[in-house]
Structures are given as structure tokens and as C-alpha cells.
Image (cartoon, rainbow, N blue to C red):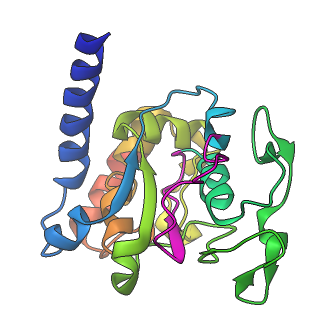
């Protein structure tokens, strides 16, 4: 078991280095301060483990609020852990996803704060959607990451998920792209890095002849 855990940790570090190393940036220090929960899932159910914060200490209570950096296709059920941390009064299995008693966490807000009958902490309003990192919230941001190749494949299977794209950013035969063409399409790879640096997941930095050629090549699959 220990050997498997060591191997998984090594693969995790390699995958993160691959994803974060796709683009040079000057924010390496703040990025590494991100309070991150790294998980590599391939469809595994995250519940009921996501409810295990419901105990006497109820997790780390030194912080007053958290912000969720939700990279697309990296575990929507992670919100269960976050809101159960903030809201000790929630029923044990209230949440989202397999094994949960359905609840809409967005309904817990009274204005900009969580309902104080159930909650004694706050979660920044990032539901619904995939809001990128904010520079002034690095130290209280939590996130879940996933192997880049698995994340891209999952996004492809989810109707070519491309949060941040507009229609003009897509190749002419976007609907016909296979997984390889989707992964090579400009603006798709590097989603996690872009979001950590404050941009949308799917984003084409500039239109140029080189970008146009790459888009055409991606369209060919």
C-alpha cells in the first residue's frame, strides 16, 4: 500500500508540473501558496468521503471564509466538503452528486453571506460557473486538480466543455472534432494554468496567422 501511495504521489507531482509548466508566469510563489487539495479521479464517487468533515472539530476553524477555484471537470462534489466545512448545521448527507441528499448550496446565501442558522463560516459565491483565481484571495482559496489528459478527455465527453470560449473562437467544424482534435484546438490545453493566473479556462490569447493555422489543423482531427 505504501509503495502504491508513493507512486501515486510521484505521478501527481509529474502531472502538476506538466500542466503548470505549459506557460511561463511570474506568479509561481502565490500559485504555490494555493491551499490545494490534489485529487486524480477517473469517475470515482467522491461521496460519502466528502461528508467526513462532519465531526467534533469540523475541520480547520481558524479561517472565516474560503473561495473555491472550480476548474472544469475536476470534481463538482468537492463543493460538499467546502460547504460542510462552512455549515456545521447541514444534514449529514446534504449535498451534490452520488450518495448525497440533493441540496442547492446557492440557496444557502442571505445576500453575500451564508445563512447563519446553518453556517458559521462563509464560502465566496462561485456558484454556478468556473470563476478564475483572484490575486487577493490566494491564501484562502481551495481547489481540486486532476491529471490534465483525463480532465481534457472528460471535458470532451461533456459536450466539448470550453468555459470562456465564444462561438468565434471555435473551429468551423467544432461539432465534428474528435478527442484529439479537441485537445489540440487553440485555447483548450492549459486550462488549469490560465485559471490560476486569473483567466478563463478556455481562452485564445491572440488571433494570428499561427493561431489560424493551428485551428485549421485541429479541425482536421
Q: Position of residue 105 (x, y in %)?
A: 78, 64
At x 58%, y 46%, the residue is: 160
* Rendering quarter of residue 199: bottom left
Q: Position of residue 58 (x, y in %)?
A: 60, 54
Which of 162 and 2 lies nearest the eye of the viewer? Answer: 2
Which of 62 and 132 lies nearest the eye of the viewer? Answer: 62
* Rendering quarter of residue 100: top right
124, above or below 216, in the image:
below
Residue 220 seen in render: no
Whether residue 72 is in magenta: the answer is yes
At x 70%, y 88%, the residue is: 112
Which of 130 and 33 lies nearest the eye of the viewer? Answer: 33
Q: Position of residue 204 (x, y in %)?
A: 36, 69
Which of 170 and 195 lies nearest the eye of the viewer? Answer: 195
At x 67%, y 42%, the residue is: 51
What segment is highlighted magenta in the picture?
52-74
Amino acid at each position: 500500500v505504501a509503495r502504491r501511495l508513493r507512486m501515486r504521489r510521484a505521478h501527481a507531482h509529474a502531472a502538476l508540473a506538466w500542466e503548470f509548466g505549459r506557460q511561463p508566469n511570474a506568479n509561481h510563489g502565490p500559485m504555490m501558496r494555493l491551499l490545494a487539495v490534489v485529487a486524480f479521479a477517473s469517475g470515482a464517487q467522491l461521496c460519502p468521503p466528502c461528508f467526513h468533515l462532519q465531526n467534533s472539530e469540523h475541520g480547520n476553524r481558524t479561517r472565516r471564509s474560503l473561495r473555491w477555484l472550480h476548474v472544469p471537470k475536476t470534481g463538482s462534489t468537492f463543493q460538499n466538503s467546502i460547504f460542510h466545512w462552512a455549515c456545521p448545521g447541514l444534514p449529514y448527507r446534504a449535498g451534490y452528486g452520488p450518495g448525497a441528499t440533493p441540496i442547492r448550496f446557492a440557496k444557502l446565501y442571505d445576500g453575500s453571506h451564508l445563512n447563519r442558522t446553518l453556517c458559521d463560516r462563509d464560502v465566496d459565491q462561485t456558484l454556478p460557473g468556473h470563476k478564475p483565481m483572484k490575486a487577493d484571495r490566494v491564501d484562502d482559496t481551495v481547489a481540486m486538480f486532476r491529471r490534465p489528459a483525463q480532465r481534457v478527455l472528460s471535458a470532451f465527453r461533456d459536450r466539448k466543455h470550453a468555459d470562456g470560449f465564444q462561438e468565434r473562437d471555435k473551429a468551423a467544424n467544432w461539432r465534428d472534432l474528435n478527442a484529439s482534435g479537441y485537445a489540440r484546438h487553440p485555447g483548450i490545453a492549459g486550462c488549469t494554468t490560465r485559471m490560476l493566473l486569473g483567466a478563463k479556462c478556455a481562452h485564445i490569447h491572440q488571433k494570428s496567422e499561427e493561431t489560424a493555422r493551428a485551428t485549421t489543423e485541429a479541425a482536421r482531427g
